[in-house]
Image: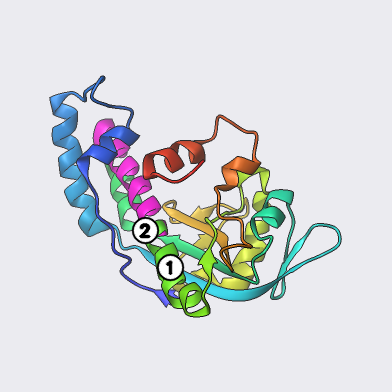
Amino acid sequence: MIIDNLPVEIDLETLLKLAGYSDERPAPKRLVTVAERVIEQARTLAHPRAVYEVHETAHAADGAVLLGKGRFTGKILNRVLEGSDLAAVYAVTLGPELDAEASRYAAGGDVLSSVLLDTVGTLVLAKASIAFVGRVFEAQAAPRGCVVTLPFGPGQCRWDLSEQRVLFDLIKPTRIGIALTDTFLMIPKKSVSGILGIGKSDEVFTSSPCQLCHRKDCPGRTMFEIMGAPR
């Protein structure tokens, strides 16, 4: 299933917070001016889309999770999907335009605009992912009287990035313009993939996967904090 035009609101305050500024450490005026400009650009350059498929979950004796014809390993994924009867395998992308403009800025020597536009892209992708989770809840979980887990994807919390290939084989993200490199990275860069469980509220794991991981120096923890999710 493909979802087009995921709704995303971009605000200056959150962007500056993501860039490391706060009331105690205010951003320079020139930076704020550039930030406002790239936010406006992002509104026309980013085109959030998603593709997903829902599969019944099964847990193998060796700890692997079976979804359709896909077999995924990893103790944290097994725990995240514990109690979920179904799981949505998905990918979300902003398309190539924002990446291309950030690269154009960098090539022209405008490092500040490049970095800020890239940071806006990170923020938009995170918000698009949240909007996607809401859509899955409305379409797949709520009608069944269920809730959804927080999403979890290859490369997070030591989940082997090579299993991105298994995920791609299940949902074919090329349908929304996402390609996979030989090193299992996604193109466009502003793309994300993962799995979220669907199950009864008293059975599913509804906390952040970060609670199952001991890694502290992870960008995901910072993003969860900024977006207001539990860590």
- The kind of secondary structure element at disc 1 is strand
Report the residue that reaches farthest toward the top: 24
- Label tally: 2
How far across and down, in percent of the image, does residue 114 sit? 29, 38
* Amino acid at the residue labelled 2: Ala
How far across and down, in percent of the image, does residue 170 sit? 62, 72
Lower sequence index among marks 1 and 2 = 1
Q: Which disc is residue 128 wearing?
A: 2
120 displayed left or right of 221: left
Which region of the structure is painted magenta?
106-129
Residue count near mark 1 (Cα–Cα under 10 Å), binned few <14, some 14–19, many ≥20: many
Check if residue 26 falls in the magenta segment: no
Residue count near mark 2 (Cα–Cα under 10 Å), binned few <14, some 14–19, many ≥20: many
* Label 1, label 2: how far apart the Cα atoms are: 9 Å
| Snapshot quadrant of residue 28 | top left
Decide which of 223, 175 is in the foreground and name it: 223
**Proximity of marks 1 and 2: CB atoms separated by less than 8 Å:** yes
**In the rendered image of this protein, does residue 118 appear above or below residue 83?**
above
Q: Main secondary structure of the magenta part?
A: helix
* Amino acid at the residue labelled 1: Ala
183 displayed left or right of 226: right
Residue at (17%, 36%) from the top-left corner? 34
170 displayed left or right of 74: left
- The kind of secondary structure element at disc 2 is helix
Residue at (33%, 66%) from the top-left corner? 6
Check if residue 119 falls in the magenta segment: yes
Residue hosting label 1: 50
**Visible residue check, residue 86:** yes
By what rule are the colours in the image chosen?
rainbow
Decide which of 133, 126 is in the foreground and name it: 133
**Visible residue check, residue 109:** no
